[in-house]
């Protein structure tokens, strides 16, 4: 096992859910963190906690990953102590709606494509040259079961996660002659703010996917990401697909209604 202690780890989408849990997991392993998200209060609070609880350094960067210019400026903004990023976790992402494609909302489509695909590309483009130059690094993308299957109403969200799958494979091919590793973690149902965001704050709709089954929690994914990152440097875990026990496919779940 490679120690994660003193590694510099950049996590996008660290203000909630999987990204936040991953920040906590890596801090517990002694990694220093560059955390990205749009909600400044949450980022700052999380950094304060991680510094206090684990004695690690933490840099909050309030950045929208869709903003190509701001993202491109990241390497130049980082002080010397932050520049050698060891691990990039491309986690920021969202789903919007479950509309049939002929009724789809074009703003929702743009938001998903710009965040899940272009945001991941912009951040990777900013960070990868340094990794290649240092001949050291690991990019871990958070994909989804939606990158392997398409479910009713999932159309554009599924397309973005299929793109993440393709980009992960493309990165691995382009980096094969370097020491930089590329992995993806592709979860099924994880109970986070994902559904609340997907259904624009409609809590009743947001609860539905997790009803009468035991979903994954963000910490389950964080532990897997840390496991992937801590393998010896000759080991590249390409892809982990992880589901709750009672989910067989994107659409086939076993739900037990308690009397
Ligand atoms: P959450 O809604 O809990 O967290 C999403 C995170 O992404 C937030 O920190 C949010 O921060 C950030 N984010 C969204 N848009 C942007 C943006 N434009 N710029 C910067 N940060 C952004 O959802 P999850 O934790 O569940 O989602 C994390 C990833 O996991 C996503 O890529 C999602 O597709 C994927 N996933 C989730 C599954 C699930 O069932 N929950 C299953 C499979 C994959 P902020 O709003 O502060 O910017
Ligand atoms: C998010 C979970 O089930 O909508 O990727 O694909 S799901």
Image (tube, helix red, strand yellow):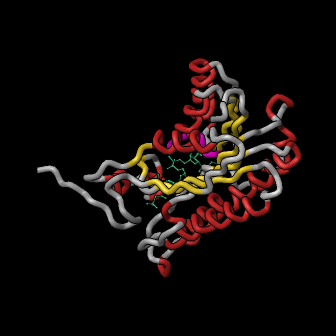
- Say if 95 sits above or below 91 in the image: below
Left or right for 155, reference 23: left
Residue 21 in the image, given as x and y percentages of width and height: 52, 37
Query: Depth check: 179 or 226 in front?
Result: 179
Residue 102 in the image, given as x and y percentages of width and height: 49, 81
- Say if 135 sits above or below 248 in the image: above
Asked if residue 15 is among those painted magenta in the image, a careful observer would answer yes
The residue drawn where x is 72% and y is 50% is 181
Q: Looking at the figure, which quarter contains the N terminus?
A: top right
The residue drawn where x is 39% and y is 65% is 249
Query: Depth check: 193 or 90 in front?
Result: 90
Query: Depth check: 58 or 25 in front?
Result: 25
Residue 178 in the image, given as x and y percentages of width and height: 82, 52
- Say if 4 sits above or below 239 in the image: above
Left or right for 125, reference 158: right
Left or right for 176, reference 38: right
- Magenta residues span 12-17
Residue 33 in the image, given as x and y percentages of width and height: 68, 33
The residue drawn where x is 67% and y is 27% is 5
Query: Depth check: 51 or 240 in front?
Result: 240
Asked if residue 176 is among those painted magenta in the image, a careful observer would answer no
């Amino acid at each position: 096992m490679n120690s994660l202690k003193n590694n510099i780890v950049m996590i996008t989408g660290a203000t909630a859910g999987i990204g936040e849990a991953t920040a906590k997991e890596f801090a517990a392993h002694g990694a220093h963190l560059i955390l990205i998200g749009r909600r400044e209060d949450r980022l700052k609070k999380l950094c304060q906690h991680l510094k206090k609880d684990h004695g690690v350094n933490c840099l909050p960067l309030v950045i929208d990953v869709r903003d190509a210019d701001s993202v491109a400026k990241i390497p130049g903004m980082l002080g010397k102590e932050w520049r050698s990023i060891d691990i990039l976790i491309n986690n920021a992402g969202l789903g919007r709606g479950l509309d049939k494609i002929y009724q789809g909302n074009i703003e929702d489509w743009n938001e998903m494509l710009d965040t899940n695909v272009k945001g991941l590309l912009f951040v990777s483009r900013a960070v990868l040259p340094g990794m290649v130059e240092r001949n050291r690094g690991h990019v871990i993308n958070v994909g989804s079961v939606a990158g392997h299957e398409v479910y009713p109403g999932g159309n554009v969200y599924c397309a973005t996660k299929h793109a993440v799958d393709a980009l992960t494979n493309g990165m691995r091919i382009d980096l094969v002659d370097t020491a930089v590793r590329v992995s993806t973690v592709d979860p099924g149902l994880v109970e986070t703010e994902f559904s609340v965001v997907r259904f624009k704050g409609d809590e009743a709709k947001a609860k539905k996917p997790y009803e009468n089954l035991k979903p994954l929690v963000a910490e389950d994914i964080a532990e897997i990401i840390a496991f992937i990152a801590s393998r010896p440097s000759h080991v590249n875990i390409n892809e982990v697909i992880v589901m709750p026990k009672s989910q067989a496919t994107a659409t086939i779940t076993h739900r037990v209604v308690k009397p």
